[in-house]
Image (spheres, rainbow, N blue to C red):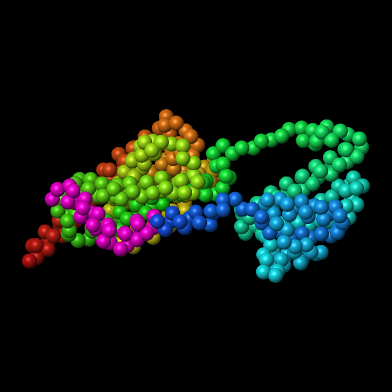
Amino acid sequence: MNWWTLVWLDLKAIVSDKAIAITLFGGVLFYSVLYPLPYLHQVPTRQAIVVVDLDRSSLSRELIRDANASPKLEVVGTVGAIPEAQRWITVGRDGVQAHGLLVIPEHFSRDIKLGKGATLAIGGNASYFLVYSTIAEGLVDVGMDFAAELKWQALTAHGSNPVAASMQLSPLDINAVPAFNLSLGYTPYMVPGLFLLILQQTLLVGTGILGAGQWRHQGYWSQVSPLMLLGCRVLAFMLIYGIFSAYYVGWCYYWYGANLTASVTEIGLLMLPFLLASSLAGIALSALFTRRELPTQIYLLSSMPMLFVSGFVWPLVLIPAPLVWLSQVFPVTPAIMGMLKMNQMGASWQQILPYWLQLWLLVVVFMPLAWRGIRYHRGRLDKASTQHGNCH
């Protein structure tokens, strides 16, 4: 049996196995749509709030108009008591669900005119963190702008030059420009790293199911040397995941608006050891399974912890050091950091070289482990075949 025949048999076994085919082809396509779908609008805007106006003055109505003019807020109603606003948030009213509230205190206008100042109260449903943060940020901005406008009116009323009054209130203009995630959206922030994790996890599941189903009985995989089977199996999965990688890192990155600053050559050079290390790790770990359902269960449970310890979702300084060290064993960790720095942050190849070398080190580590795992199960199959022959 030559190499290409063995590669073809492996590809045929992968495609014809429903569990593997659904995980690889169905999972990759399904997750490319599922994960970014809730965040296609990128940044929450026009969040519904209800105003509790206890003052009912012209000044309070002006503040309400300013809040409604904010791109982050939409005033859906004005009530006269806090419990009524709370019911609007918890159960809704007239088919409209509010997510936050602004309380304008009694004597608001009088205290402002007397120079005593007034305190605005804000609140919201914190069950949705992005929605709550948008409402809180929007209301704080509205309050600060409203206070600055009142101060400007007071200064000009006392004879100050309007331009000088504006400079006194705001001597510095801050021009905040995002360096990498230009839209400040969730999708370009999460998608680049998350897609690499999906590639690794589906690859581990696919190799695990294939191995767990084959180690129990004879087949074409037991008719060749362990080294030949290892090389052909890695090549078979590399052919499939080369296409998946082009779909994720190419088309999906472009479609979802992720930054694309690295060249095709640089991306290919980084993806090569990542896919090699993931394939070899999957084959090595497949030697631990003899039940086909176990790889899917174990790898799915490990996906979320792996996402956090990879370093781009949660600060590494807040993660216990032993977990951070353990995460370096998984190929996706250096791959994510290298891809983000090179493709999203514009780092040079020299700057991500340590991650590239780490991936090649993992290739060197997992290769003998994968070979030893295949050799172990090959020996068990040969021994079982010999014993069966002696019985006859």
Q: Residue at x 53, y 57 (%)?
A: 38
On the image, the x and y values in percent for residue 134 come to 65, 51
Q: Residue at x 26, y 61 (%)?
A: 16
Magenta-colored stretch includes residue 369? no
Q: In the rendered view, would you say 360 is above or below 198?
A: above
Farthest-out residue, top: 350
**Can residue 337 be seen in the rendering of this structure?**
no
On the image, the x and y values in percent for residue 44 come to 61, 53
Tell me the quarter of the image containing the C terminus: bottom left
Q: In the rendered view, would you say 246 is above or below 49?
A: above
Magenta-colored stretch includes residue 11? yes
On the image, the x and y values in percent for residue 99 come to 67, 60
Nearest to the observer: residue 352 or residue 269: 269
**Can residue 117 be seen in the rendering of this structure?**
yes
On the image, the x and y values in percent for residue 28 come to 39, 55
Residue 150, located in which quarter of the rendered image?
top right
Q: Residue at x 77, y 44 (%)?
A: 145
Does 321 sit left or right of 146 as displayed? left
Count of number-bearing discs = 0
Nearest to the observer: residue 35 or residue 304: 35
Does 342 sit left or right of 5 as displayed? right
Which residues are the magenta region? 1-28
Q: Residue at x 91, y 39 (%)?
A: 157
Magenta: main secondary structure equals helix
Does 288 sit left or right of 310 as displayed? left
